[in-house]
C-alpha cells in the first residue's frame, strides 16, 4: 500500500548470523531459490535457468545441525531460478530426489518462502514435501532485508554502467549507514519502487504494472520466441530503428531547441504505424521487435524512477529484479535515461545478485519453529474472523566471523 511504513528486524554487524538451508521467492514469472548445496546434489533439470555463487566474503555459514560438508561449502550459496509455470514440476523433482531431507534426517525442515507464490503453492508444497513447514514471509520486507544484507557485507556487489564505454564499473564499499536513504526500483513481473530510510524502515512510494512480465508476455505474443535465453540473445542483435520512430524521422535532424538528438526514440513501434499497409507483421525481424520492447519498458520504468527520486530529493537509485538480468543493454538504457533526465546529477546503481533479493532475505531471516507456529495461529485467527493483530517473536541472529 502506498505510504505504508514497515518495521524490520535489526541486524547488528557485531553479532553472528545463522541462516536457513534455503530461501524461496515465487514470483509471477520466475521462482528464485537461494540454497546451500546438499551433501549429494543431483543434476538439476534443464529448465533451471541460472546458477551462480555469493562471494565468500559474506559472513554466512550453514547451521551446525545441517549435515553439509562445510569444508566444501564454507559459506557458498547457490542461486537458481525456474519459470514459475514449472513450479509444480520442480516440487515433484525435489520430492522424487528427497532433496528436502538431505539437510539432516533429524531436522524437520522449515521453508522460508516469500512472494505471491508462498500462498498460491502452499497446498502443493504440503502435499509433495511431507513434514516441511512453511514460513510465509512478507515480500517487501524480504526484498529490503536481502539488499541491506548485501550492502552491509558484500565487498564487490554494487556497480554502475558506463553506457558510452559499455563498461561495468564496481563501486567502492561504503559504511553501511552511508547508503541511506536510497530508492530501490525492483523490477519483476511488475515494478515496485521503495524508499528506504534506514536499516529498519522502508516505504513503498510508487510502482507500475508494466514490468518484466509485460516485456516477456509481449515477446511471446509478437514473436515465436519460447525461452528467455533466446530473448537475451535477440535483444543484443536487434536494431530498434527498424520499428521505432525516432526524432530524426520526424524533423530530419536534432531538435536542438528541446535538447533532443536525432536518434532519441519519439514513438516506440511508431515506424510500424507509418509503414505502408501491405507490410505484414511477419515482415519485421523478431530481434528488432524484442529490442524495441526492451527499450520501451526500460524507458518507462526509468522515467518513473527518476520522477520519484526528484520528488523525494534522493540521488541514490538501485535497480534490481529479474528483468535487470537482461544485462548490459538494460543497464545502458537505464544509465542513459537517468543521467539524461537528471542532467548528470544521478547515476543509477545495479547489484551483482539482482533478481534474488527476496530469496536472500528469506534465507537470512531463518524463521524458527516458534515463529512458524505463531504464523499458523494468526492465520487461523484471521479465518475465524478474529480482530487481533498477529504478533511475532523477536528473532535473535547468531553471526559467525567469516575470515
Image (tube, rainbow, N blue to C red):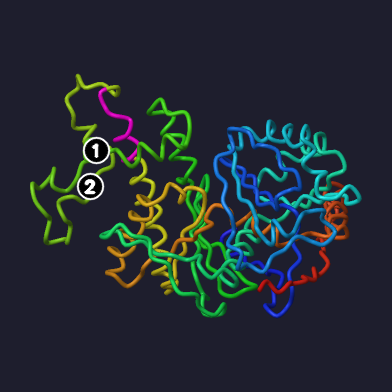
Left or right, 148 with respect to 170, comes to right
Mark linked to residue 266? 2
Asked which secondary structure carries label 2, the reply is: strand
Task: Provide the major secondary structure of the magenta segment.
Answer: helix
- Tell whether label 1 touches label 2 (CB within 8 Å): yes
Quarter of the picture holding the N terminus: bottom right
Mark 1 neighbour density, 10 Å: few (under 14) some (14–19) many (20 or more): some
Q: Is 171 above or below relative to 283?
A: below
Closest to the observer: 249 or 175?
A: 175
The picture quadrant where one finds residue 400 is bottom right
Asked which secondary structure carries label 1, the reply is: helix
The picture quadrant where one finds residue 145 is bottom right
Q: Which residues are magenta?
A: 283-292
Q: Residue at x 56, y 62 (%)?
A: 204
Residue extending farthest right: 106
Q: Position of residue 158 (x, y in %)?
A: 47, 66
Closest to the observer: 325 or 57?
A: 57
The picture quadrant where one finds residue 17 is bottom right
Q: Position of residue 374 (x, y in %)?
A: 86, 58
Left or right, 77 with respect to 382, comes to left
Mark linked to residue 270? 1
Mark 2 neighbour density, 10 Å: few (under 14) some (14–19) many (20 or more): some
Q: Residue at x 45, y 72 (%)?
A: 312
Left or right, 218 with respect to 10, comes to left
Q: Is residue 45 magenta?
A: no
Amino acid at each position: 500500500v502506498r505510504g505504508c511504513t514497515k518495521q524490520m528486524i535489526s541486524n547488528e554487524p557485531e553479532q553472528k548470523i545463522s541462516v536457513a538451508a534455503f530461501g524461496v521467492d515465487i514470483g509471477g514469472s520466475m521462482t528464485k531459490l537461494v540454497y546451500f548445496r546438499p551433501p549429494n546434489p543431483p543434476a538439476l533439470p534443464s529448465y533451471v535457468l541460472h546458477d551462480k555463487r555469493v562471494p565468500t566474503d559474506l559472513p554466512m555459514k550453514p547451521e551446525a545441525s545441517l549435515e553439509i560438508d562445510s569444508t566444501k561449502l564454507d559459506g557458498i550459496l547457490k542461486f537458481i531460478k525456474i519459470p514459475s509455470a514449472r513450479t509444480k514440476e520442480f516440487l515433484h523433482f525435489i520430492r522424487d530426489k528427497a532433496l528436502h531431507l538431505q539437510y539432516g534426517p533429524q531436522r524437520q525442515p522449515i521453508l522460508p518462502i516469500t512472494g505471491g507464490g508462498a500462498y498460491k503453492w502452499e497446498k502443493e508444497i504440503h502435499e509433495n514435501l511431507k513434514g516441511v513447514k512453511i514460513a510465509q514471509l512478507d515480500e517487501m520486507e524480504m526484498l529490503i532485508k536481502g539488499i541491506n544484507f548485501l550492502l552491509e557485507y558484500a565487498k564487490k556487489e554494487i556497480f554502475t554502467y558506463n553506457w558510452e564505454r559499455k563498461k561495468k564499473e564496481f563501486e567502492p564499499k561504503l559504511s553501511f549507514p552511508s547508503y541511506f536513504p536510497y530508492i530501490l526500483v525492483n523490477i519483476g513481473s511488475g515494478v515496485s519502487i521503495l524508499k528506504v530510510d534506514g536499516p529498519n524502515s522502508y516505504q513503498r512510494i510508487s510502482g507500475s504494472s508494466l514490468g518484466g512480465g509485460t516485456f516477456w508476455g509481449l515477446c511471446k505474443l509478437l514473436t515465436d520466441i519460447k525461452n528467455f535465453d533466446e530473448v537475451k540473445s535477440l535483444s543484443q542483435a536487434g536494431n530498434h530503428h527498424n520499428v521505432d520512430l525516432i526524432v530524426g524521422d520526424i524533423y530530419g535532424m536534432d531538435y536542438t531547441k528541446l535538447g533532443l538528438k536525432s536518434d532519441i526514440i519519439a514513438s516506440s513501434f511508431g515506424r510500424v504505424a507509418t509503414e505502408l499497409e501491405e507490410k505484414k507483421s511477419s515482415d519485421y525481424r523478431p530481434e528488432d521487435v524484442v529490442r524495441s520492447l526492451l527499450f520501451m519498458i526500460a524507458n518507462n520504468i526509468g522515467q518513473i524512477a527518476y520522477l520519484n527520486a526528484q520528488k523525494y530529493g534522493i540521488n541514490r537509485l538501485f535497480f534490481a529484479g529479474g528483468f535487470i538480468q537482461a544485462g548490459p543493454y538494460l543497464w545502458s538504457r537505464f544509465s542513459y535515461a537517468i543521467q539524461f533526465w537528471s542532467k548528470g546529477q544521478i547515476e543509477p546503481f545495479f547489484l551483482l545478485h539482482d533478481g534474488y533479493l527476496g530469496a536472500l532475505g528469506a534465507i537470512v531471516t531463518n524463521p524458527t519453529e516458534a515463529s512458524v507456529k505463531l504464523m499458523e495461529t494468526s492465520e487461523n485467527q484471521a479465518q475465524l474472523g478474529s480482530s487481533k493483530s498477529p504478533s511475532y517473536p523477536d528473532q535473535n541472529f547468531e553471526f559467525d566471523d567469516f575470515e
